[in-house]
Amino acid sequence: MISYIIPTRDRVETLRTTLAAIESLGDHANCGGAEVIVVDNASREMPILPRRLASGVPLRYLRRATNEGAAARNTGVRASDPDSSWIVMLDDDSYPTTPDFAEALFCQPADVWAVSADIWLPRSGGSRESGGLPEVFIGCGVAIRRERFLQLGGYDPAFNYYAEEYDLAARIIEAGGRIAFDPRFTVHHLKDTRNRDFNTIIGRLIRNNGWVMQRYAPECERLERLRETRARYRRIAMHENAVAGYTQGLIELRRTLRDQPRRAMSQHHWDRFTGLDAARYALHAAYQRSPFRTAAIVDAGKNAWVVARALDELGVRLAGEGEEAEAMVIGTMSPGPLLDAWERRIRRATSYGPRVLTPWVIGEPATRIVHPAHTRITAAA
């Protein structure tokens, strides 16, 4: 059995679209049934919802007195049926596209505690959701074993929204679990823009990502990663005209940084968390098949520093300006942007041009990821 957990606030029509999409998946008999739990974060007007979808799936509505942010998911999980094996976390504007995704959950080995979805943005020309890492999921499309979620205490309410998934993913890794990416679990995220203020968003992003670095980075990396986090969100804030939000978030980060519970990860766990293990594995495999001396990092994004470090450890030099590199390496460890960039690059690749490589081998034991369309997406020359 699975339980869908959907927090919502003041987006009744969006929520109805999501519920209709879940209803279209049928009765979920292939996974022992399902339930939907909607947790209302103090909407101004209560939505009128059925007690059961037309497909027969029961629905429960829980109303909170205040806006609890992502922590409302904790309330939903605690109220879920104890017979549920998997909790499917959605937003009120995201939903699975086919009922087959349940098979991807129930065939996972016991040490996989969470499964990340392949999240698409149908309103953005067919691109994928940004964010996440090989072992860090995105909150609007992830399934987590119910027992493990409760064991770990769920989401930390202090985060409200943004980067709370990074905090929980870190605790999963520390506790001995793994997080897998499986594109049989496909989610559409309509990304409703209502109630989204980018100054608030960027403020939370800089503060909350800084908290994650302070909590979990090994001491030898903590200050460098804090600097990288500040620089990354400064660039984003300038691009999105949200410098005021960035400044406020940075003030909050500095005020609260020393209060964060310090639980530095072991280097091995940290390398998994950041994606460095995955990058090392992928680029080493590509190098062994056909060595290359120079590389250019292209389509840089989340944790591009990981790609640069993995190349440096291989002894591969980054090509200078105007120099043609032997390989182009996609410079992000986020699953969605990585796959989008790979598909764009490989369509334009020629037999006489540089090799196109990804820093993440999908389908290998290092991360045990299965992708039917890209069995080994690290391309040979």
Image (tube, helix red, strand yellow):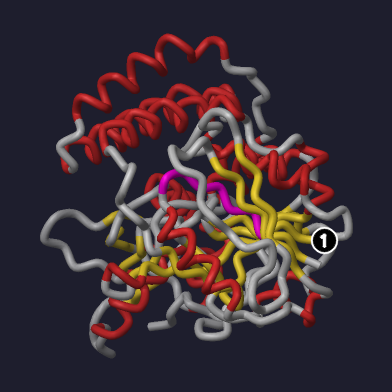
Q: Which residue is mark 1?
A: 85
Where residue 253 sits in the image (x, y, percent)? 41, 18
Rendered location of residue 159, percent (x, y): 52, 29
The C terminus appears in which quarter of the rendering?
Answer: bottom left
Tag 1: Cα neighbours inside 10 Å, few (<14), some, or many (≥20)? many
Considering every residue shown, the one lying at the far right of the view is 83
Inspect this view and state whether residue 114 appears: no
What's under tag 1, amino acid-wise? Ser
Is residue 360 in view?
yes
Pick the front one: 223 or 83: 83
In the image, farthest residue toward the bottom: 351
Tell me the magenta residue range. 4-10
42 in relation to 138, above or below: above
**Residue at x 22%, y 36% (from the top left corner):** 237
Q: Is residue 366 above or below residue 261?
A: below
- Residue 316: image x %, image y %? 39, 57
Q: Residue at x 54, y 64 (%)?
A: 284
| Depth check, front residue: 172 or 103 | 103
**Horizontal arrangement in the rendering, residue 332 relative to residue 4 (left or right):** left
